[in-house]
Amino acid sequence: MTKYNRSKEPASSEITSKSDYISRRQFVKAAAAVGGLALLWAGRPKPPGSEVALTESSSATGASTGDAPQIPATSVPTPVTDELGMALTSYKDVTSYNNYYEFTTDKTEVARLASDFQTSPWQVEVGGLVRNPGTYDIDDLRTKFDQEERIYRLRCVEAWSMVIPWLGFPLRKLLAEVEPTDKAKYVRFETLADRSQMPGLSAPWYNWPYVEGLRLDEAMHDLTLLSTGLYGDPLTPQNGAPIRLVVPWKYGFKSIKSIVKIDLVEEMPVSLWMTAGPNEYGFYSNVNPEVDHPRWSQATERRIGSSGRIPTIKFNGYEAEVAHLYAGMDLTENF
Ligand code: MTE
């Protein structure tokens, strides 16, 4: 087994082509100048000089419109690791090794089967126990809320993981708009279930549509992201276009894709996975190396694009940010 060493320089084969990502970041920067994005790195306090003032004016092709000063490319932050120094998973791996059971259970076939998935027009209905229910067009969500870049680790319950630069906005901003009432205790999410587009829905042993849930305080946490893109581009269908949840301290199945409905509710939602395997998949599903899956260990994980295994970190490395949410709770019982 490969010994894990945080300070180890990743092999060049393990990381994204730097020039590729720099050019993608230039795209984000250009989009920011046009659309008023905020570039943030992992939503953390940033090292000095890591944030760029997005003052220049440019088009998405990078052409200057003339007036504002151009920031030289060398001054653009180009983090190719997460805040723990872990290399980004390549764009190719992120978009070709996917879990999306509405299409297929074969990870390497999702991209092909989802290639014609219609993600526009797209609306997300937000309601339930809220003062201002609403139906949001995906284009409105993209412009209404600043799109931030967040580099997060994604740890699948199957014990593989990736490091992904997402684009999106904190779910709390949308929740603030709809104003949950005092009765609202949980948030329930639902994926589109369209048999004409999603061949996997013919599998009768799952309780479609795909449903997930969070406690309201988890949903309001700043790390909880509604993602609309990755690597500076809009989300691909296989990654959950046009909008998905990303909850980085929980197993990947909580990060529900292609959301059409968000409801504030009083009772704990029952997820598709809780129904499919009540002894294997709980509501909380916090990444925890100390609590094994009944059929395999969760102590280590395989980082896609690398060889060997690395230790799994409690709460996927976000313990300082989220442990307080579970103070006093038995995490073995509340798995
Ligand atoms: N969302 C829906 N609607 N359907 C799914 O099958 N799979 C989940 C999650 N969201 C899934 C889903 C699982 S198990 C994982 S690990 C992640 O999506 C994978 O996300 P990725 O394919 O973008 O890496």
Image: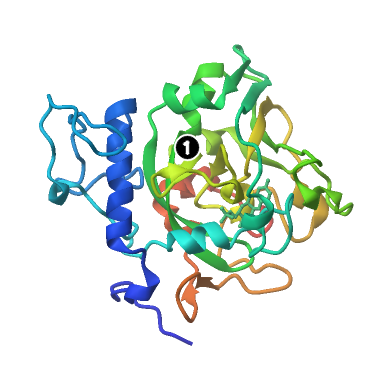
Which amino acid is tagged 1? His
| Residue 150 picture location, percent across and down | 39, 46
Furthest-top residue in this view: 131
Residue 134 placement: quadrant: top right
Q: Quadrant of the C terminus?
A: bottom right
Of residues 268 and 272, the one drawn nearer to the viewer in this rendering: 272
Is residue 202 shown left or right of residue 302? right
Q: Residue at x 46, y 28 (%)?
A: 142
Report whether residue 245 is seen.
yes
What residue is at 56 percent from the left and 61 percent from the top? 96
Residue drawn 81% across the image and 42% down it: 195
Q: Which residue is mark 1?
A: 221
Q: Is residue 242 above or below residue 160?
A: above
Image coordinates of residue 158 in percent, x first then y, are 64, 66
User: Is residue 181 something one can see in this rendering?
Assistant: no
Please tell me whether residue 18 is drawn above or below residue 261 in the rendered image: below
Q: Residue at x 63, y 15 (%)?
A: 133
Picture coordinates of residue 121, whole percent (x, y) = 61, 27
Q: Is residue 74 above or below residue 234?
A: below
- Return the residue nearer the eye: 215 or 251: 251
Sort mark 1 into few (<14), some (14-19) or many (20+) by Cα contacts within 10 Å. some
In this image, 27 relative to 118: left or right? left
